[in-house]
Image: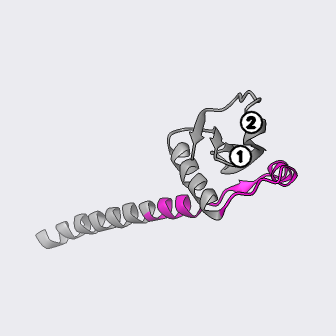
Amino acid sequence: MNHIQNYPIHTNNILAKQQSSFKSLLENELTSSQKLKISKHAQTRLTEREITLSDETWSQIEKKISEARKKGVQDSLVLVNEAALIINAKNNTVITAMDRDEARTQMFTNISGAIIMD
């Protein structure tokens, strides 16, 4: 009888650990595999301004945006050597882009974070 009483408790502990592990794996997979989306507006700006970023730079930006999102940042200014990007961290979307020279004369409003990368 004592063995039967412990069985459900043991099973509940195993299920709780499995659910916790699955949740952790799912969150890590979703966060690490989320690629930035580029809005039509941002794509037009990137093309017009002949801004190209390497795959490595995009990957670094994605990691930083993921970190920013975890800290509650919604809209972020991201400065890289080639460009200034406004990215909605919540939706993982590049909103607009400009080259660094153009960015020097701009005022950025309605952002809740800035990421400066070299």
Choose between 98 and 96: the one closer to the eye: 98
Numbered disc 1: secondary structure = strand
Q: Residue at x 76, y 45 (%)?
A: 97
The label shown at residue 103 is 2
Q: Where is residue 64 in the image (x, y as percent from the top left)?
A: 54, 49
Quarter that holds the N terminus: bottom left
Whether 81 is drawn above or below 109: the answer is below
Q: Residue at x 36, y 67 (%)?
A: 18
Local crowd at mark 1 within 10 Å, few (<14), some, or many (≥20)?
A: some
Extent of the magenta region: 25-54
**Main SS of the magenta segment?**
helix
Choose between 53 and 36: the one closer to the eye: 53
Amino acid type of the residue tagged 2 in the rendering: Ala
- Of pointers 1 and 2, the one earlier in the residue sequence: 1
Whether 23 is drawn above or below 93: the answer is below
Q: Where is residue 61 in the image (x, y as percent from the top left)?
A: 60, 52
Badge 1 vs badge 2, beta-carbon distance below 8 Å: yes
Q: Tell me the colour scheme of the image.
A: one colour
Numbered disc 2: secondary structure = helix
Left or right, residue 90 beside residue 101: left
Q: Residue at x 62, y 57 (%)?
A: 57
Amino acid type of the residue tagged 1 in the rendering: Ala
The label shown at residue 83 is 1
Residue 29 drawn in magenta: yes
Q: Which residue is drawn at 78% across and 37% down?
A: 102
Task: Residue 33: name its quadrant.
Answer: bottom right
Question: Outermost residue toward the left?
Answer: 2
Q: Distance between the residues labelled 1 and 2?
A: 8 Å
The label shown at residue 100 is none
